[in-house]
Every structure is written in structure tokens, then in C-alpha cells.
Image (cartoon, rainbow, N blue to C red):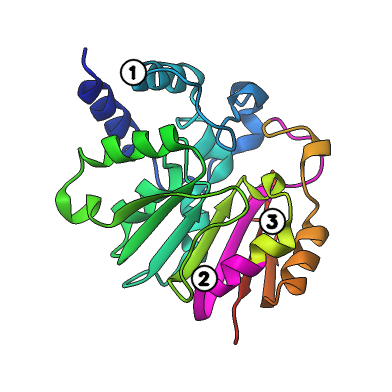
Amino acid sequence: MNQAFYHFLFLAFFLALPACSDDYDTATHHHSVQSHQYKEAQSPPHTSLQDQYKKSNKENEVGNNRWIWQKPQVVIDKLQPLAGKVVADIGAGPYGYFAFRIAHQSPVEKVLAIDIDAEALQFIEETKSLLDKNISDRIETRLVESHDPMLKEGEADIVLIVNTVPYFEDRVDYFSRLRKGLRKGGKIVIVDFKKRNTPVGPPPSERVALAKVEKELKQSGFKRLEVDDRALEYQYIITAERVE
């Protein structure tokens, strides 16, 4: 089978996942959620795209387990309203988990799939080529440096960061750069793991506590912080705005 076929399978499987999984009882399905399936914050292995698809399908990295605990529609609802907006998805690789969902489900103007890994962005580029043009045109990949999201001033209306915050070396500086990349009135939405043992995710020592992220957002100039640590069992959601 050629790579295009594997991309087609990936996309069909990916976008067919249930969007509304809020009522799924994760407590009764812990046996199917294994910590080794948490791969999204890591770069894909240096293998062919075909091998990446096989590996992702085998381990359900983007499949029928993650949507149970990640509840992507809950996260996307935090971004609303999306119509006509530019969304910067920081750490979009390796599979464009949220970038494709946002572009597919909502009439956004643009989704900037931002990552430091060229192979991850190549996968997103080749996969989006299988979409209808009106959807694929909404997705723009951008290769950046680890310390700089490379957003133009006021370029984005919304910044989304999922499972990536612990990997920023200087979060206050990085958040400050993101704030400059937001238009006035724009918002940042951060989703990451609670600092405790959970069936999925990195070890607690590699996580960042909710209170620490709140403090760093304030230090970088964000205002109107809102915290939701109940919607997701294993993760917290922080929303903050660029007021001026």
C-alpha cells in the first residue's frame, strides 16, 4: 500500500471518532487506557510516514482511547467562538490531533499548526492534502524554534497549547511571546496534566502544577484567568486573555 492510502486510512479513522464523548465513563475503562499510549508531546520517530501510521494505529495514540480522556470537543468548546478566527495550535504534531478537528468542525479563518519537528509537520501537510480544499486551505503548518512560536504581532485570535507546557524551557518568556502574537482581546487556552499519578501522561515529576502555570501567565501579562480542573479527569484547562 502506498503512503497516500495510509494517510487516507488515518484521516478517515481520525475524523470518524466520536466528537461528543463527555458522557463516557472513563472510570470503567481504565483497563484500556495505558500510559505508554501518551505520545502526543513527543516527536514522531524518524521512520517513514507509513510506519508512523502503523505505529499510531497499533498503540491508539490518536485513536479510540485518547478521545475518552482528552475529550477534544470539550477543549474545542473552550475556544469558542471560532468563526472567522485565527487559531495557533502550539505543538500541533505529531499528528495534528486538534488542528484537523478545529479546521474540520468549525468555520475558522485559519489554523496555524505550529511545531519544532519538521517530520511532524510533513505528516500534517501530506494528510491535509486528502481533505476538501475548503478545509485544507484553513490549515497552515509552521516550523519554529523551541524558544519562539514565531507569531507576528497580533496575528492570532486564539492560542491553544495541549500537552506541551512542560517542554518550554522559559515559560514566562514563551508566554510573553505568545501574548504579543495575540490580538487585543485574544485568548490563550492551556490544557495539561494534573500533577499527580494518572493512567496516561508523563510521570508527575515531568508535569507543571496548575498554580505554577497560573503564576507564569500573570507574570507574562495575561489577565482574566479562568481555571477548569473538573471537565477533564486527568487534566486542567486554563484560559487567559490579552487585555491590552
* Residue that carries the numbered disc 3 in the rendered image: 230
Marked residue nearer the N-terminal end (1 or 3):
1
Tell me the amino acid under the disc marked 2. Answer: Gly
Q: Which quadrant holds the N terminus?
A: top left
Task: Tell me how many marks there are.
Answer: 3
SS of the residue at dot 2?
Answer: helix
C-alpha distance separating marks 2 and 1? 35 Å
Say few, some or many: other residues with alpha carbon within 10 Å of mark 1 (under 14 / 14 to 19 / 20 or more): some
Q: Give the quadrant of residue 210.
A: bottom right
Q: Position of residue 43 (x, y in %)?
A: 54, 31
Foreground mark, 2 or 1?
A: 2
Marked residue nearer the N-terminal end (2 or 1):
1
Q: Position of residue 112 (x, y in %)?
A: 40, 56
Tell me the amino acid under the disc marked 1. Answer: Gln
Look at the numbered discs 2 and 1 and tell me whether their residues touch, using CB distance below 8 Å: no
* Residue that carries the numbered disc 2 in the rendered image: 181
Q: Which residues are magenta?
A: 176-199
Tell me the amino acid under the disc marked 3. Answer: Arg
On residue 50, which mark appears? 1
